[in-house]
Image: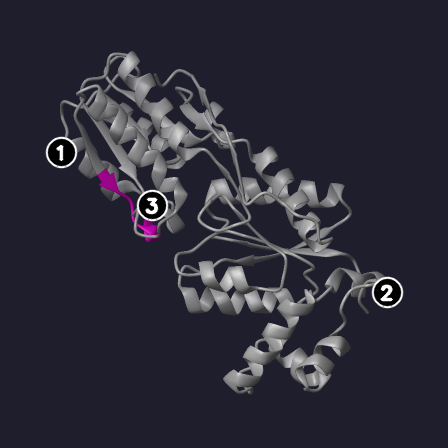
Amino acid sequence: MEGKGMATIIDVAKEAGVSTATVSRVLNGSPNLTDATRARVLEVMRKLNYRPNAVARSLVTGETRCLGIMLPDLNMPFWSQLAHELSRAAEAHGYALMVTNSPQDRDSYIRSYRALSRNMSGGIITSFINGTEEFLGKSLVPTVVIANANCSPSVSSNDRQGGTLAARHLIAKGCHNLVHIAGEMKYHRTSDERTYAFLEECKRNNVPCKVYHATTDMQKENDYRGIISDAFYGNRDMDGIFASNDIIASLCISTALSLGYRIPEDLKIVGYDDINISSMIFPSLTTIRQNYRLLAETSVEAVIDLMAGKPVPEHQIFPVDLVERKST
C-alpha cells in the first residue's frame, strides 16, 4: 500500500503497459527481463516519482519500521562505533536497523544493496565504494552515503581539516622528520583527503614526510605489524607519526615503547577517529576526533526526510577536532 496521493505500483504498471508482477521484478532486480522492458519501467517510475514504500507496508502489516545499513567489516572500530550511534539514532525515531556487510567489489556491493532494499528497508544508509555512483544515483530507494562525500546525498567529516590539524600539531611540537601511515588510496574515498592535506602542510613547512600505505586486508584484520615494522626500521630518525586510524596509532605506541623510544620526548604520535580505546591506552593517544553521534543522527534524519519526499542537502560535511593527550 502506498501513501495517499503517491503513485502506486498499479499506476506504474498501467503507464508502462506491463503487469504489476513485471514492475515487482524490476524492483527486485530480477534478471528475467529484457533491457528494454526494464528501462521502460524505470523511466515511468522516475516520471511518476514512484518510491517503493516499505515503511508504509510495515505500518499496515504491523511489522517494525526498518532502515537498512550497509557498512564495511564491523571488526574495524570506527565502523562498529558508528553502527552503535546509528542504532541509537534510528531507535530515537522509532526505527529498527537491518545491518549488512558492504563488500568492496562493485558487483557484490550491488547484490547486497538490492537484497537489503527488498527486506523491508524503507531507506538505506551505506558506506561508499568506487564505481557505484551511477547505481546509487539511479536507485529508487532513498539512500544516504555516510563517511564519504563522493556521492549525494552524503554525510561525512571534514578529512582535509583533519589532516591539516594533525600536521600543524606535530610541527608545532617540534617534529622535523615525519612518517604517515595511510590507507591504500585507490578507492577514491574522501578520507584520502586527510593524507593529501597532511602532506601539503608538511611541504608548506619544509618538513619531510615518508608515507606508507596500509592495505584493505590489513584494515579488515587490524593486522598492521608488517607495515609498522617497516616504518620504524626504515626511519630511525623520525620524530613524529601520523596514523590514518587509532588502531595503527596505538600499535605504533606499543612498538615504540618496546624499542626503547620515550613518548612523547623521542617520538610523538597522532591518530585519527578518537575511538573508545584512544583515551584508555598508555600513554593516551592524541587524535583527530570525528563526531560519531552527529554523523549518525544527521544520516538517519536525512534518509527519513528522503523517505518522506523532503529535500536534503547534497553534501553535509562536519568539522573535526584535535584532541591532545599524552602521546604528543
Q: Is residue 311 above or below residue 37?
A: above
Q: Is residue 309 found left or right of 218 in the rendered image?
A: right
Task: Locate the N terminus by quadrant.
Answer: bottom right
Q: CA distance from mark 3 to mark 1?
A: 19 Å
Give 137 or 32, whichever is nearer the viewer. Answer: 137
- Name the foreground residue: 151 vs 84: 151
Q: Which residue is mark 1?
A: 234
Give the mark nearer the N terminus: 1 vs 2.
Answer: 2
Asked whether residue 266 is in view, the answer is yes
Mark 2 or 3: the one toward you: 2
Q: Position of residue 276 (x, y in %)?
A: 52, 31
Look at label 2 and name its amino acid.
Answer: Val
55 in relation to 39, above or below: above
Instruction: Check residue 223 in the rendering and tell me which mark sits there, or answer none.
Output: 3
Magenta span contains residue 217: yes
Distance of label 2 from label 3 (alpha carbons): 48 Å
177 relative to 256 in the view: left or right: left
Q: Is-magenta flag for residue 158?
A: no
Please give the residue where the numbered disc 2 appears in the rendered image: 60
| Three-letter amino acid code of the residue under disc 3 | Asp
Residue located at (54% from left, 31% from top):
291
Which quadrant of the figure has residue 228?
top left
Mark identifier at residue 307 = none
**Which of the two labelled residues, at mark 2 and mark 3, occupies the earlier sequence position?**
2
- Drawn side of residue 301 relative to residue 36, left or right: right
| Image depth: mark 1 or mark 2 in front | 2
Q: Quadrant of the C terminus?
A: top left
Instruction: Determine the residue positioned at 78% across, 47% down.
Output: 94
Rendered location of residue 85, percent (x, y) = 62, 39
Q: Would residue 75 appear left or right of 93 to someone viewing this image?
A: left
Label 3 or label 1, whichever comes before in sequence order:
3
Mark 1: give few (<14), some (14-19) or many (20+) Cα within 10 Å. few
